Image (tube, coloured by chain):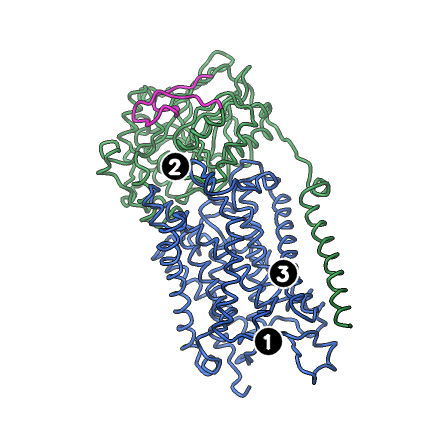
Chain colours: A green, B blue
Amino acid sequence: MAEDFSRRSFIKGASLGVAAGYFAAAGLSSTALYKQVMPAEKLNQTDIGEVKALRMKVISETSWYDNNVLLNDLKGAGGLLVNQYTIPWTSNGVAAGYNGNNAGGFATYIEADLMDGSTKRILLDTGWNPAWMEKRFIEEGVAEKLAKKQIDYWIISHEHFDHYWGLEATLKYNPNQDVYVPKGFYTEGFDLLKGKAFPKAQVKNDFPHKGKVHVMDSSKVNPLFPGAALMTFDMPIICRVFGEQAFVFNVKDKGIVLVTGCCHMGIITYMETVRKKIKGGEKIYAVQGGLHISPFEDWDPQYDDLILALNKYGIQKIGANHCTGFIAVEKMISAKLPVVTGTKRNMTKRDIYLGNGDTLAV
Amino acid sequence: MTTKTYDGSAATQEMETEHHYEELDKIWLEERSLTNSLAQPLRGLLGFFLSFGFFMALWYVTMDPRGILQWYTPMYGYMYIRWLLIVAIWQAYIFNFWPFKQKWMEETHPLVKGPIMIGINWAITGAIIWIGFFWLIGKYSIPYFSWPELHKVGMTDFFAREYAGLAVLMVAAIASWLAPIWPMAFENYPWHKLTQPAKGFTVLSLTSLLTIFVYFIFMHPHYMVLFYPWQKFAAAMPWWYESAKTLSGNYNVGWIMCGTIAVWLIETIWERYPFRLIKSQPWRGLAGFAWVLFVALIMFNTFNLMQDLAWGPAYEGGKRLYAPDWRYLHSGELAVMMLLPALVLYFYFDNWPKKFSTEVNLAIRTIIVVVGTFAFNFIYYQISPPLLGTQPGYSHPQQFPMAPVILWIVIMLYHNWFMDGWPGKRIKKDK
């Protein structure tokens, strides 16, 4: 009897305790109590001004030509955490590659018409394979503008091989070009800029940089000129890279235009940060560049979360390419997102990307 | 488990207030009587640094991206780690070291029986992964359980290995939550009178069956959306999407990890309190299971809330720090970080303190573990890049603090379950 009483008492007490404790804890993290505990959102918006118009030309979005080759390089080196400067990347014998080299590169050329009638010219990134990048720079007139010192800003989105290692293609034409890199660059990145070679990774720089190096802070918005700013995001990225920066433009009568290299921070995180930190940031008009969703045509349910959430932001134009992934863009089209298609030329594989030589004008 | 008190005979009834319950079944680890070879804190420190040293060596050889085998890619290596853990639990808790006799376990030197036990642990792990999953289940049933089969049907070799690794490790993760509950809470009821290996295979069968159910309900839908196009004829839409704001199975991974950790917190620093106060089975077991769930949900919600307070709310569709699914996963990671100081206290510092009332002892240990968790968390993110070859920062899609922490825990289990905590401890020969 005593045993029964003890058991009943325990079960009754335990049940009450468990239920009360659970609802207290669940309540804290979900409903009314959650709002009491969580501080209210603080907006700290910077007015970056406006530009009149914007043209973004894709110089090269084809960073590599064969996913399997790249992934086998990574797997053979020890996975996605291995230092990129120590990986023996495949540089010949790739049927789909540029002259057999799997390396291509990413770069975008941007022209911004200011309200005073002048134009600012920007080169975002400099690709991977210098031969390929130089060819594309010549074809699209970027090489000439570099040589004539007409490029106002050379921005490196992040230190990844396919965005940064083709720096000879830029420095060959203007070694004095100032460069803007995000906070988080490793020593190797600065050494490469100065002319150091990394034979194992087959990367070198025979045109040492002589201009200024600006390291962009991640704690604040970094205005470039009226209507344009850079935002730096602190985060570790595959192949032992840290930090990425991306553009915010405010185009008169249109809204915010975001231009990215790879967008490792995630496009939703990027837009939410812009909403909090940029005046007018709640109205995103267009997004252009690599959105880093399924760069290797891999997938994860988290990416579906992203596609499903994108529809809630009212974006008018999405010019996606590079590391966005074809699967991701197909899903965007299925979700009726406003994808701007391209012309599938200059080695871009599909027209659902804003591809090499294509321009998005706002 | 030498820290608990037991009765079970009429002669001890007068000690009812001290010895609360009758235990149906005890494993050898509970009956094993250890004596200290060294005084504290020397013994504790020696054990701690020995286990850490072996962990570092094993990590470098097998996992470190700068090391030899480089399996931490991360899912492939993490898969092995999770299976080493569950196989160790099976060896000690479910099979009670069968086929080895208790006498052999007591009389054999730790340096002899340790490598044998560890060798068996590794062999079973390898056989389950390569024969059970990659070859058998993956080839003849569900390809996503097999690296070679996924590669054969067109996936890149790298992601074939990673996707299969995730599926295979999740089975182990769920099993390591459910399997120890039976010997720990139910004391193997109603099969406590069976002898080994019948008892082991019975409990293994039951917990494996439960693992299969839990896996298919809580993880299989993750694979519905993992492949393109969605595999709607093979798996249900993730049913947790509306409440969790993510399609990812990481939502379930998070609370299941908290459940696994809850089991071991209850088993070690909390001495199966308070459900051990119930006198008979199956009520004690059912209450124990409910207690595990309760503690798990409290931990899960608390860790989720702490992250929201630290970084602000996650966004639907966000990545990295702001991805809802990563937040859930990180709650599981924080729970694992909580287990580490708990096991250090339990294995190496004699589950201090023991001199107060049960409630006070448990409260002090809990405070120590909470403080230890914060300290370990801080230290981990400061020193893991140079030490483990990982990258700085909290959220990285290719690294999981769970992996190194669990590997260290596995080493502690090897040391204390398979090797009696030698050389700091030894078995009392005159028992």
Q: Secondary structure at mark 3?
A: helix
Q: Which residue is mark 2?
A: A297
Q: Point out the frontmost of discs 3 and 2.
A: 3
Above or below, B346 against B322 in this view is below
Crowding at dot 3, Cα within 10 Å, few <14 / some 14-19 / many 20+, comes out as: many
Q: Point out the frontmost of discs 1 and 3.
A: 3
Q: Which residues are magenta?
A: A337-362
Q: Position of residue A38 (x, y in %)?
A: 68, 41
Asked if the magenta segment contains residue A203, the reply would be: no
Q: Secondary structure at mark 2?
A: loop
Q: Which mark is residue B282?
A: none
Above or below, B71 against B25 in this view is above
Q: Which mark is residue B289?
A: 3
User: In the image, what residue type sits under mark 1?
Assistant: Thr
Letter of the chain that mark 3 sits on in the rendering: B
* Main secondary structure of the magenta stretch: loop
**Which residue is rendered at x = 34% and y = 24% of the image?**
A356
Between the residue at mark 3 and the residue at mark 2, the CA separation in whole angstroms equals 42 Å
